[in-house]
Image (cartoon, rainbow, N blue to C red):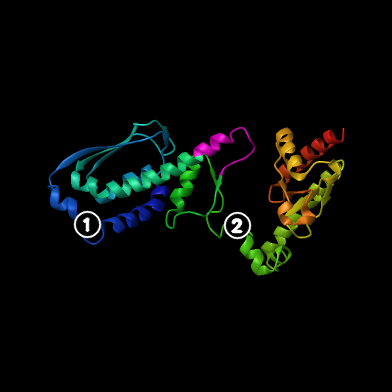
């Protein structure tokens, strides 16, 4: 019921957009009002079903007398040629809703299927596929739901969900330190969180031979100076990922002074940062012999 309350206004808007002011004038001119049809919706390729409820709702809204049989649930994995729904009744109602229904079903199933492919690719790793706010206007609820059906997770649903400082904020504030130095309580809480995580990580990394953790000074990263290990940043990062399953990024893009450094994001929760820090220490000790 809750999903229908969210989806129905979107489906109604799509039908109004398609049917326009006069309805399906081609069907009305060619197909007799009493003509009936039995239609099936079948998959042209294997994938994950999503948007089926929205699709079937389109038929229901155009002609409530249509008989609709849903043969699988959203989130189901289906094979090529598998039937997901049957619709029977007045042909005019079926044809009038067909394109809107398929638009919802094909787009959302495409999102769910693509997400499932990515989620399967990282299965077994401590990682997840997360979507952003880069959604089709008006379809965010459906598209984010499709991501979840495909095995992914949702990040912010809207700007009011959580703070996320991005490049434009930093540019307008005059730098990272200025962006994090505002007087808003939320900014103060974020600064304290990053400060606490930086101290935790720096304390752990102090035991890493030939490495030096540099405090962020208001930023969102701890930089790890690994020049003493004798490895370049890319070689160190690649070996660390292979041996300890920890991914760090080289800092060469920050300029010549950042060569030989790796960055560790403070956006991860503290238990994960602590675990990653201890893995880095273990790896550095193997390099030191």
Q: Is residue 164 left or right of residue 205?
A: left
The image quadrant of residue 86 is: top left
Position of residue 171 measured from the top left corner of the image (x, y, whole percent): 65, 66
Magenta-span inclusion, residue 89: no
Residue 161 numbered mark, or none: none
Residue for badge 2? 162
Q: Residue at (28%, 46%) from the top-left corner?
A: 98
Magenta segment: 116-129
Q: CA distance from mark 1 to mark 2?
A: 43 Å
Q: Residue at (26%, 56%) from the top-left corner?
A: 19
Position of residue 12 measured from the top left corner of the image (x, y, whole percent): 32, 55
Mark 2 or mark 1, which is nearer the start of the sequence? Answer: 1
Position of residue 37 measured from the top left corner of the image (x, y, whole percent): 19, 39
Dot 1 surroundings within 10 Å: few (below 14), some, or many (20 or more)? few
User: Which residue is outermost to the front?
Assistant: 256
Dot 2 surroundings within 10 Å: few (below 14), some, or many (20 or more)? few
Q: Which image quarter is the C terminus in?
A: top right
Residue for badge 1? 23
Q: Residue at (41%, 33%) from the top-left corner?
A: 46
């Amino acid at each position: 019921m809750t999903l229908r309350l969210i989806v129905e206004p979107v489906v109604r808007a799509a039908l109004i957009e398609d049917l326009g002011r006069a309805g399906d004038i081609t069907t009305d001119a060619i197909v007799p009002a009493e003509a009936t049809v039995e239609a099936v919706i079948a998959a042209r390729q294997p994938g994950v079903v999503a948007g089926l409820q929205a699709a079937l709702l389109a038929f229901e809204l155009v002609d409530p007398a249509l008989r609709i049989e849903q043969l699988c649930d959203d989130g189901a994995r289906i094979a090529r040629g598998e039937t997901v729904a049957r619709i029977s009744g007045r042909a005019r109602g079926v044809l009038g809703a067909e394109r809107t229904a398929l638009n919802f079903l094909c787009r959302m199933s495409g999102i769910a299927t693509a997400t499932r492919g990515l989620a399967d690719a990282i299965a077994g790793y401590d990682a997840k596929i997360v979507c952003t706010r880069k959604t089709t206007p008006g379809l965010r609820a459906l598209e984010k739901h499709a991501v979840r059906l495909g095995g992914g997770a949702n990040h912010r649903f809207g700007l009011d969900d959580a703070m996320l400082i991005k490049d434009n904020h930093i540019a307008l504030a005059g730098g990272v330190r200025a962006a994090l130095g505002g007087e808003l309580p939320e900014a103060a809480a974020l600064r304290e969180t990053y400060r606490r995580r930086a101290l935790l990580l720096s304390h752990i990394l102090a035991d890493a031979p030939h490495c030096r953790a540099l405090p962020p000074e208001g930023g969102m990263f701890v930089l790890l100076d690994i020049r003493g290990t004798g490895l370049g940043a890319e070689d160190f990062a690649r070996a660390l990922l292979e041996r300890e399953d920890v991914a760090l990024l080289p800092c060469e893009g920050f300029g010549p002074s950042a060569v030989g450094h790796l960055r560790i994001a403070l956006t991860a929760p503290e238990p994960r940062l602590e675990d990653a820090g201890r893995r880095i220490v273990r790896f550095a000790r193997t390099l030191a012999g």
